[in-house]
Amino acid sequence: MVVTSLMLLVAAGVSGGVALFPTSDVKNDTTPAVVRVMEQVLSTVAYSDYSISFLTDGFTSASTVYKLVDQLRIPGGVGIFEVAGERPEIQLSLVIDHIKRLRELTSHTTVLVISDDPAFLAAFAEWSLKGRLLVWSTRLLAVTRLTLSELHPLHRAFSKSNAMLLIFKDESANIRCNMYVHLPYSPKEAKALKVATWTPRQGLTLTTHLQLFPNKFSKFLHRPTLLAASEVNPFNKIITIQDAKAPGGQRSIYKGPVPELMAYLAKGLNFSYTYVRPPNGFWGAKLSNGSWVGMVGMVKREEVSIGVGPFIFSGQRAEVVDFTVPILIDYWRILGVRGRPTVDPWSFLFPLAPLVWAAILAALVMLPAVVFLMSSCFFPKKEYQENWILVIFGYSRILLQQDILVPVDLWWERVMLAVWMLTTLVLTRSYAGNLMSLLAVRHILEPYQSRRVVLDDPSVTMIWERGSAVGRYLSSVKSGIYREIAEAEKEGRLIWRTHKQFAGDIDTLVRRGDHVLMEVDSGLKAYVSQDFGKTGECSFYESKEEFLPLMFGMIGPKDSPLIPALNKRITSMTEAGLFFQWLKTDEPNSTVCYRAPTKITVKSTLSLTNTWGMFVVIVTGHTFSLLVLCLELLSHQR
């Protein structure tokens, strides 16, 4: 069974007036009217089973509380708390903590605050935000007789929470209730929007198209302007153009998949936005004193409403900000420079696979051995039986397309010889054709295909992103390959750079060949695409190895109700494949160099560069034969 918790917080009594819920000696009791309006309001949002918790500040008698409980007919349990004294702030913090525990035990929660004390209401709103009581899943209804001007301190808390304000008026025996909603991101001086009224005769009447407790963040009514933290990255490019009307005569334009996503969200939620860049260019780094810098710090301090990013999901960041659903799931790869086309001097060995070479050598031994053994057993008077090596040389001469010296008289020997000649004919023709093709092949080196290869090469330096979640992970890991990568910094083989510096580093350090860039795959594709657009060739490659799987999303302040609204739009966008389409549109050459061929063919004359491997074999063979000759001479003399 789903249990819904309805918490009723009562703080009655103001100096110099009559409380909304008076003590038992007050004649003009408005409790029945208040109970009726609350019953109608709660009937639209409450569930079949709920509980109520009362919070009083000492002005409401126990009999009044029991009377209220009896008239509301609460199906669940009832809790009663009292906050009394001159400084209720300390007690409020403790009480709110207890209420939060009750909220965590239920599926739905509605908090009801009834008070005519503006100081108490302001203190409650402040401590509710500090204590994270007013999350969007918690409904809040504040009932009071104060005017809107007196309730101005509640604007900040009520505008960002699922809250309604019910103002009770009982002047001249005419009872009337007005219900208001504070619109999100509205100016501090803006008035609350009236959504409903209640009178004893007409009951509850809606004054707008909005329902009670409307989802204010699903689509904004007044098109607010939000501040969005953003920085240069492969998904978000900043282009500066000349504009005489702009400050300084220049204006920045943001282009890429992320600006397309922001435009999509702004249209769907009805808001405008202004980009704000972090002063240090950091995405988010936690300092030793516990504070945060970069865009994550800006979002945490609520200097901006959205952190565009997209940001890498991490547990440390999730402690201070809220992430949206993933926009993209990606992996890290290694970016290196492709080598120049070179000739492999041992290409004359490649026309035949190693297994074929082994089979040829085995045949040169097995076939003559079979012939020699069969001749020895069945025809003992054959002349060449005294030296079986002559038979091996005979079959080898056929492989080398020479004549045969050993006489072949018997039919079975002729059959074996004919089959061997046919086999060697096919092999030699195939070898010659493949060799001519391979001599025209140029090989392009892509040496760094894994982290281990990079670590084992002392001549290469790694480039990692400064101030990123991966950087913090490298600094904290205690063992494994990432610990080796972190220790490479002590040897000068690891440097930290910002996203803004990556493009320049790729064009200089990485292109030089002694540096590699560690970056997300989609970001590397953007850099390679941009380079291909400039040079017309694939100068860089991405490693085959993928590591550190990552999820990317936007961020917002902790418990921000804007995040669920963004999640709904982002989910629709990813399911439709729009983000990948924006990626393809922004970088049309992003897949041109993906898995570019490492072998190319050219037309050129043969040179010593192509054939020096063959000469090595010739010299080695002659040297070996000379050594054998010397051994034979020495053996003959002995």
Image: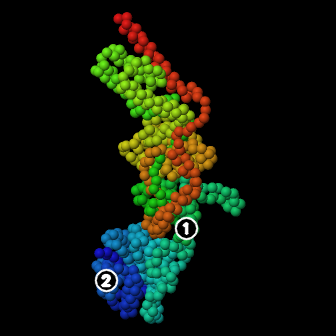
Q: Residue at x 44, y 24 (%)?
A: 398
Q: 133 and 369: which one is in front?
A: 369
Q: Residue at x 47, y 83 (%)?
A: 179
The secondary structure type at the circle numbered 1 is helix
Label 1 is placed on what type of residue? Answer: Ala
Looking at the image, can residue 73 be seen? Answer: yes
Rounded to the nearest whole Å, what is the CA distance between mark 2 and mark 1? Answer: 43 Å
Give the x, y percent position of residue 566.
Answer: 48, 67
Give the x, y percent position of residue 437.
Answer: 54, 35
Q: 609 and 549: which one is in front?
A: 609
The secondary structure type at the circle numbered 2 is loop
Rendered position, 395 above or below 119: above
| Quarter occupied by residue 212 | bottom left
Which circle, 2 or 1, is nearer the viewer?
1
Q: Residue at x 49, y 31 (%)?
A: 429
Kindly identify which residue carries mark 2.
74
Kindly identify which residue carries mark 1.
266
Q: Which mark is residue 338?
A: none
Give the x, y percent position of residue 392.
Answer: 38, 21
Quarter of the image that includes the N terminus: bottom left
For the view shown, which residue lies furthest in the top direction? Answer: 637
| Quarter occupied by residue 201 | bottom left
Give the x, y percent position of residue 44.
Answer: 40, 82
The crowding category of the residue bearing disc 1, from other C-alpha atoms within 10 Å (few below 14, some 14 to 19, many at least 20), is many
The crowding category of the residue bearing disc 2, from other C-alpha atoms within 10 Å (few below 14, some 14 to 19, many at least 20), is some
Quarter of the image that includes the C terminus: top left
